[in-house]
Image (tube, helix red, strand yellow):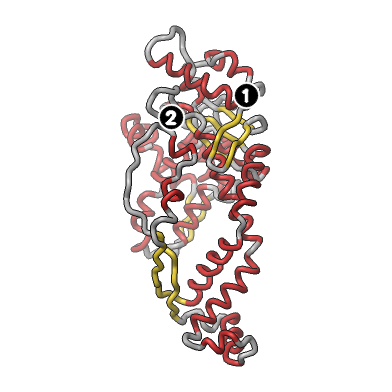
């Protein structure tokens, strides 16, 4: 993906992953270093992806066990609500227990306080000095020493409603089969995983081969076998990268895709060029998404009881200002909308709690009054926008 900053390269990749329900990880190519230098090892991107897949699958498995976990949590809550009544706890037909169960399900006991035991493994602080990458090769200190140190239980007082959620999570976690989770996560990583390598242009060598240029080429050569297809050792077992989708992206202002080593260029056969965003794009970005900036600010002001309305010409004026500032200064794409909106509503945000008038209509005139002077003054706009 070739396109200027703020054009939506990462967002496209994230949406792809969301649609495919695939584990997705974003890494910056410039953070990696050639083997032998201090810095991140390129294989860590695959390990990060596996960790993410583990969390995804574990969460799905816990959800599938929720009904069973709710029943177990309910029994534990009833035990807490009937302290010392061992005979009642054993007697399923106990009228007291059944009565409490009904009240619990109706939410009548939500405000009652109970004392819940939670496990807490006390680990002494320790720092391990060793060769680079030992923590990534599966040497997890907590896992190695977790069984040696005693598991301590803490007693916490909380409302029944909070205790119920905590107990459901605890019980669901106990019901999850971690061996199954690891197998599924490895499989999902290998078959559906997406790795987004950003700033790929930062490791492109530019004419000559002196100083840091050599290291840049070394990083490319280290990335090559992973993109090509190899086996990476993780603490959950070996993971093959043959079918992982790799998406590389960069602005390529200075470097060109042809500056990458030929072998790496050939491993990214599909090239997409993204154009800079224009005024019409900004209007759509401000209004169409569910979490559009205008909706975010309306929700933020609603917390202070203020109703914020934007007219169509106000949205057009915001988009026009963003496009104009991007042209005159550095083009940072849709990110410019954040700074424009913040500047536009800065005064309102600070004065919202004391404001008497609870309804505010923002039109094109309001936007021009607040932004035109700043946008036209180059010195001011450099610092404010």
Ranked by sequence position, the earlier of labels 2 and 1 is: 2
Could you say whether the residue bearing mark 1 is in a helix, strand or loop?
Answer: helix
Could you say whether the residue bearing mark 2 is in a helix, strand or loop?
Answer: helix
Q: Please say if 11 is above or below 289.
A: above
Question: What residue sits right under mark 1 in the picture?
Answer: 228
The numbered dot on residue 31 is 2
The N terminus - image quarter: top right
Q: Quadrant of residue 92?
A: bottom right
- Residue located 55% across and 35% down the image: 233
The foreground one among 280 and 266 is: 266
Q: Is residue 282 visible?
A: no
The foreground one among 305 and 157 is: 157
The numbered dot on residue 323 is none
Q: Please say if 375 is above or below 256.
A: below
Where in the figure is residue 245, as x and y percent of width and height? 64, 32
Residue 94 falls left or right of residue 354? right
- Residue located 58% across and 76% down the image: 74
Disc 1: CA contacts within 10 A as few (<14), some (14-19) or many (>=20): some
Q: Please say if 209 is above or below 4.
A: above
Looking at this view, name the residue that lies furthest to the bottom.
95
Residue 262 falls left or right of residue 34? right
- Residue located 52% across and 39% down the image: 48
Q: Please say if 232 is above or below 253.
A: below
CA–CA distance between discs 2 and 1? 20 Å
Q: Is residue 127 visible?
A: yes
Where in the figure is residue 77, as x and y percent of width and height? 53, 78
Where in the figure is residue 63, as x and y percent of width and height? 63, 60
The C terminus - image quarter: top left
């Amino acid at each position: 993906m070739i396109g200027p900053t703020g054009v939506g390269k990462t967002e496209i990749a994230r949406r792809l992953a969301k649609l495919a329900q695939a584990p997705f990880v974003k890494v910056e190519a410039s953070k990696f270093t050639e083997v032998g230098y201090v810095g991140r090892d390129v294989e860590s991107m695959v390990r990060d992806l596996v960790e993410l897949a583990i969390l995804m699958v574990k969460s799905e498995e816990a959800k599938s066990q929720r009904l069973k976990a709710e029943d177990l949590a309910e029994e534990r809550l009833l035990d807490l609500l009937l302290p010392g009544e061992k005979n009642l706890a054993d007697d399923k037909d106990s009228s007291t227990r059944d009565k409490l169960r009904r009240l619990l399900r109706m939410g009548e006991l939500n405000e009652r306080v109970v004392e819940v035991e939670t496990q807490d493994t006390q680990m002494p602080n320790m720092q391990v000095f060793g060769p680079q990458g030992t923590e990534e090769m599966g040497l997890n200190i907590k896992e190695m020493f977790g069984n040696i140190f005693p598991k301590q239980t803490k007693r916490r007082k909380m409302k029944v409603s909070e205790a119920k959620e905590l107990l459901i999570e605890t019980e669901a976690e106990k019901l999850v089969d971690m061996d199954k989770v690891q197998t599924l996560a490895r499989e999902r990583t290998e078959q559906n995983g997406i790795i987004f390598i950003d700033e790929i242009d930062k490791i492109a060598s530019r004419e000559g081969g002196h100083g840091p240029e050599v290291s840049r080429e070394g990083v490319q050569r280290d990335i090559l076998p992973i993109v090509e297809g190899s086996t990476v050792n993780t603490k959950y077992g070996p993971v093959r990268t043959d079918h992982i989708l790799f998406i590389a992206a960069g602005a390529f202002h200075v470097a060109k895709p042809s500056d990458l080593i030929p072998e790496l260029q050939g491993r990214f056969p599909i090239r997409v060029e993204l154009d800079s965003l224009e005024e019409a794009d900004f209007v759509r970005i401000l209004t169409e998404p569910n979490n559009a900036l205008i909706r975010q600010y309306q929700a933020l002001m609603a917390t202070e009881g203020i109703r914020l309305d934007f007219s169509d010409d106000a949205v057009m004026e915001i988009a026009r200002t963003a496009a104009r500032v991007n042209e005159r200064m550095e083009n940072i794409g849709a990110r410019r909308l954040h700074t424009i909106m913040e500047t536009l509503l800065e005064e309102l945000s600070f004065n919202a709690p004391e404001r008497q008038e609870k309804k505010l209509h923002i039109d094109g005139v309001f936007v021009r009054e607040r932004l035109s002077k700043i946008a036209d003054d180059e010195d001011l706009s450099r610092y404010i926008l």
